[in-house]
Image (spheres, grey):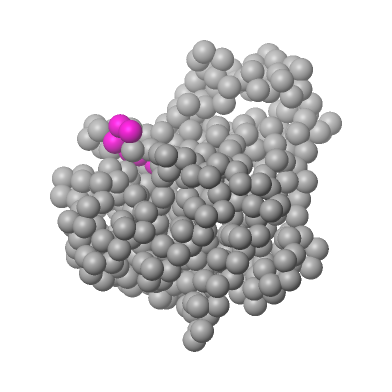
């Protein structure tokens, strides 16, 4: 089982961000911590002391919390569940909020062994447009401090397709990160304009200007080639890692493992049931204090059918380099995945968007760039799942966050 702990606090709200986060008011941080610690204690009695393979503390900006607070949450998980010996523990951090090397020392002592820094851009003007609270020099300093403290597994988040960004500058930034910062893992996310964000309003008003589709295509394709030539293997649409440094937590999402989420707005999927905690702090704390489970008065609860779970498994597997094993489809439907969709797959193959090998369907790099379109065609060709057209399933917030992280 995977565990995700959501920290909803940020120093400031990024202009592109639609995740559940806000600038905390007085007293909210301590109330949040007390609530999460109490919530963790509730779950062993509900699902047992399950074995945990990864813990991911995300947000928001977890590094707005003292290292001792993060340590307290990790200790509570350790007291309530069984931890694998090779447990991966990731904490997202803003390059500015770590502040000093002692903070990273304290994170290591608390049990954190993987750090994810939300760099996003190496251009200070771009960072200001995004409303990021750090500079490019802050990012370099944070990474070097984390290294000096002892971190040996560091991810950097970078964004492409930003307003005013050009291909040449994107490639220069990647080359600088590879040569000068040398992280073990790099996540590259294309900017998505989300509803109810300043970027959405500015884009509708014509105030944001982007490069053309061909240049965006090259940002993804050329960027991936630069990273792989430097030894960063692409294992998922947005994720590249040195050998042995893939993010186990996000891989767990893509491979359909159960996950348990704590904190406001956190999502869980266990044994075919999915629930979402209340997004606001007050309702979250009321739920925890009353001992209620998400659903009904507090949050949401959904029973996932076998068909829904299969559709999600196809969608998530196709995000990875490994792709989808067709035998899983036969187990659920009793039908042949490739024969049932032969005409479509022939067309996608002729366009260079998919490959089929050893019973697996996977997307080419070009297919990954238009993955939503490809998957929509695939789902629309699967009437056996629900007696009609199968719309591409909306990912859970946990999966969406992993697919478009870039929030720290």
Q: Which residues are magenta?
A: 238-244
In the image, taking residue 27 as reference, residue 134 lies left or right, namely left
Residue 75 percent across, percent down from the top left: 46, 58
Residue at image point 40% right, 52% down: 90
**Residue 344 visible in rendering:** yes
Residue at image point 41% right, 45% down: 88
Residue at image point 71% right, 52% down: 46
In the image, taking residue 4 as reference, residue 329 lies left or right, namely right
Residue at image point 55% right, 41% down: 51
For the C terminus, the image quarter is bottom left
In this rendering, is residue 181 above or below 32? above
Image quadrant assignment for residue 297: bottom right
**Residue 158 visible in rendering:** no
Image quadrant assignment for residue 35: bottom right
In the image, taking residue 212 as reference, residue 121 lies left or right, namely left
Check if residue 146 falls in the magenta segment.
Answer: no
Residue 345 percent across, percent down from the top left: 60, 20
Q: Nearer the viewer, residue 316 or 29?
A: 29
Residue 285 percent across, percent down from the top left: 64, 73
In this rendering, is residue 329 above or below 287? above
In this rendering, is residue 273 above or below 293? above
Q: Nearer the viewer, residue 53 or 309?
A: 53
Number of numbered discs: 0
Q: Nearer the viewer, residue 343 or 212?
A: 343
Check if residue 240 falls in the magenta segment.
Answer: yes
Q: Residue at the right extreme? A: 387
For the N terminus, the image quarter is top right
């Amino acid at each position: 089982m995977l565990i995700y702990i959501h920290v909803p606090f940020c120093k400031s709200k990024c202009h592109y961000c639609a995740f559940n986060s806000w600038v905390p008011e007085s007293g909210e941080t301590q109330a949040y911590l007390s609530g999460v610690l109490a919530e963790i204690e509730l779950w062993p009695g509900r699902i047992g002391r399950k074995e945990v393979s990864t813990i991911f503390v995300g947000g928001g900006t977890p590094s707005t919390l003292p290292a001792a607070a993060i340590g307290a949450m990790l200790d509570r998980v350790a007291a309530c569940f069984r931890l694998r010996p090779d447990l991966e523990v990731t904490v997202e951090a803003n390059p500015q909020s770590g502040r000093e090397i002692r903070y990273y020392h304290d994170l290591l002592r608390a049990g954190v062994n993987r750090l994810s820094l939300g760099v996003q851009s190496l251009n200070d003007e771009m960072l200001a447009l995004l409303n990021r609270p750090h500079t490019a020099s802050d990012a370099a300093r944070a990474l070097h401090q984390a290294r000096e403290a002892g971190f040996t597994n560091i991810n950097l988040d970078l964004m492409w397709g930003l307003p005013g960004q050009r291909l040449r500058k994107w490639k220069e930034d990647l080359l600088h990160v590879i040569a000068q910062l040398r992280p073990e893992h790099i996540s590259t996310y294309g900017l998505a304009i989300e509803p109810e964000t300043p970027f959405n309003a500015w884009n509708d008003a014509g105030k944001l200007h982007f490069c053309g589709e061909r240049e965006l295509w090259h940002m993804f394709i050329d960027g991936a080639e630069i990273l792989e030539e430097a030894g960063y293997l692409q294992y998922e649409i947005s994720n590249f890692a040195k050998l042995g440094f893939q993010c186990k937590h996000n891989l767990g999402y893509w491979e359909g493992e159960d996950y348990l989420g704590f904190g406001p707005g956190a999502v869980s999927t266990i044994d075919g049931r999915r629930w979402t905690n209340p997004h606001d702090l007050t309702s979250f704390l009321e739920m925890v204090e009353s001992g209620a489970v998400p659903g009904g008065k507090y949050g949401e609860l959904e029973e996932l059918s076998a068909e829904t779970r299969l559709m999600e498994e196809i969608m998530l597997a196709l995000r990875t380099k490994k792709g989808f094993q067709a035998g899983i489809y036969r187990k659920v439907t009793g039908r042949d995945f490739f024969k049932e969709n032969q005409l479509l797959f022939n067309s996608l193959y002729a366009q260079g968007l998919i490959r089929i090998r050893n019973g697996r369907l996977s997307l080419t790099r070009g297919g990954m760039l238009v993955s939503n379109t490809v998957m929509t065609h695939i789902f629309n060709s699967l009437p056996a799942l629900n007696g009609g057209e199968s719309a591409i399933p909306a990912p859970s917030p946990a999966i969406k966050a992993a697919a478009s992280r870039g929030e720290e």
